Image (cartoon, helix red, strand yellow):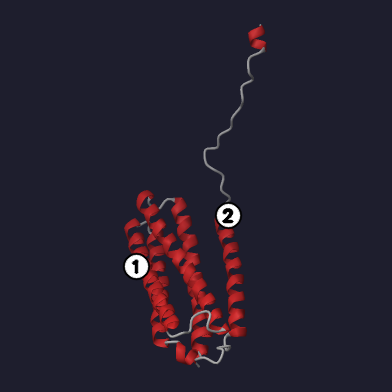
Amino acid sequence: MSDLAHAPTPVRAYHLAHEPHPENGTALGFWLYLMSDCLIFAALFATWGVLGRSYAGGPGGAELFDLKLVAINTAFLLLSSITFGFAMLQKQLGKVGGTLGWLFVTGVFGVLFLAVELYEFRHLIHEGAGPQSSAAMSAFFTLVGTHGLHVTFGTIWLVVLMIQISKHGLIRENKRRLMCLSMFWHFLDVVWIGVFTFVYLMGVL
């Protein structure tokens, strides 16, 4: 009886068959993140709006910006948005190979966009129009550079997601990640259209 009295009380454990995940919880959280990103870019656009003509007596946008080069770069990013759409269509059809193929093409366009942007930055700095040359160029490098960082992280995310899809296929988790990356990528396209219009086009005109 004494052994039974001192026996430890068994601990009850409850195990769920699936980890709880609220329906559409990820989508809501990611939309909130995108809204916060909108505020960041809104502040950077406002800064450019205030400082965009303050070239400290140096050359202005008409002399510094190469619209042909920027138009080519814009085409790269817009085409990457189209190819991402094709990847999402392949995802809807359940085709792993097609999804990976179009994601790869999207990544190539993303890398080309970044390469052209880095070339432009290098050219501007070589011409003496670096971020320290004037208030306008500080605002320019901050705005365009922040967008470039987003594209860089988006491209890294794209590569990691391709690896996950190649290993595990189009499981529910990967479909959810694809949806989030799709929203992020299209958001970057919309921001770039604003950059092209308000920074480059109006800067030259």
Above or below: residue 131 compared with residue 178: below
| Image location (x, y in percent) of residue 146 | 52, 71
| Image location (x, y in percent) of residue 62 | 47, 92
- Horizontally, residue 144 falls left or right of residue 105, namely right
Which numbered mark, 2 or 1, is in the foreground of this view? 1
Which part of the image, by quadrant, shows the N terminus? Answer: top right
- Horizontally, residue 8 falls left or right of residue 132, namely right
Question: What residue is at 37 percent from the left and 66 percent from the top?
Answer: 107
Look at label 1 and name its amino acid.
Val
Residue that carries the numbered disc 1 in the rendered image: 105
Marker disc for residue 25: 2
Splitting the image into 4 quarters, where does residue 69 fall? bottom left
Question: What residue is at 51 percent from the left and 70 percent from the top?
Answer: 187
CA neighbours of label 1 inside 10 A, class few (<14), some (14 to 19), many (20+): some
Q: How many marks?
A: 2
Label 1: state its secondary structure.
helix
Give 181 or 139, whichever is nearer the viewer. 139
Question: What residue is at 38 percent from the left and 69 percent from the top?
Answer: 111
